[in-house]
Image (spheres, rainbow, N blue to C red):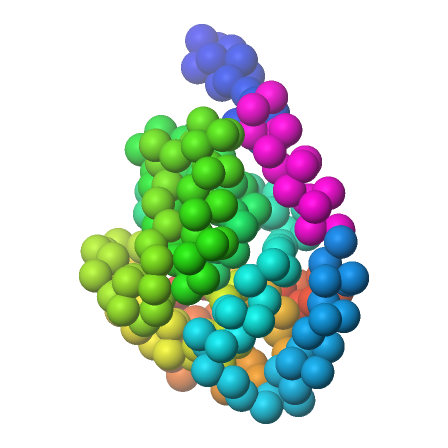
Amino acid sequence: MEREMSMAATPSSLDDPKVKAVVDRLHAAASGDAFRMLAHLPTFLGALLDRKLPAAEMSRRFKDVYIPLSRPQGKLLYLVARSLDARRIVEFGSSFGISTLYAAAAARDNGTGRVIGSELEPGKRAKALEHLAEAGLDGVAEVRLGDALQTLRDVPSPIDLVLLDGWKDLYLPMIEMLAPKLRPGAVVLADNVRTFKRALAAYLDYVQSGRNGFQSVTLPFPSGFEYSVRI
């Protein structure tokens, strides 16, 4: 009974006024992405058609675009991290830090959790760190600057949860690099598997085929959110 009362009295960090204020403001700012994307429409359409540009060039062109998880996706990220009691959460593609905030809220609520994010665009990374500090979550999260295939290479085992939301042609090499470090039962969430169906076909085959130690399902979010479990 004492444990139940203690748990009931412990609020979610998503309800922390400082966290909520930053998350709400960033989602409101991200709602203008449709207009910002117009300036990059040829690049975006090319990405949909799997016409590849180097990640550094894509990051430069989209330096002012949020391209975040939706609120429901962010809440799901938080809930999955809490249900796993995730202690080590890895994020590929932090952008301005919206998804990082959801993951960091769960990391803090789990007690000893930590988020290790990555961002290629310096301006976005600086803003993500600023937003984490403003929300009071900077003590449980970091965002590494540079090519994630290098900056995340030394993340130690075991990894409990991975979010893939960076440039789509890197999903497959990212999961190939991180898979040996995933503990049994670890979850990988990958955004935009419907939006970028052609570009992510090889990644989906990797997690859905059953040949690589995963069981996977595409959750019915508009962009397609792949939920994969390390078996």
Position of residue 175 measured from the top left corner of the image (x, y, whole percent): 38, 72
- Residue 71 lies in the magenta-colored region: no
Residue 140 vertical placement versus 226 (above, below) = above
- Left or right: residue 40 versus residue 215 is right
Q: Is residue 30 visible?
A: yes
Residue 157 figure quarter: bottom left
Residue range of the region highlighted in magenta in the rendering: 17-31
Seen at 37% across and 41% down, the residue is 141
Seen at 63% across and 29% down, the residue is 21
Seen at 41% across and 64% down, the residue is 120
- Left or right: residue 106 versus residue 231 is right
- Residue 18 lies in the magenta-colored region: yes
Q: Is the magenta region chiefly helix, strand or loop?
A: helix
Seen at 78% across and 62% down, the residue is 35
Position of residue 217 measured from the top left corner of the image (x, y, whole percent): 59, 69
Position of residue 71 measured from the top left corner of the image (x, y, whole percent): 68, 46
Q: Can residue 72 be seen in this view?
A: no
Seen from the viewer's position, the closer of residues 111 and 45 is 45
Residue 105 vertical placement versus 188 (above, below) = above
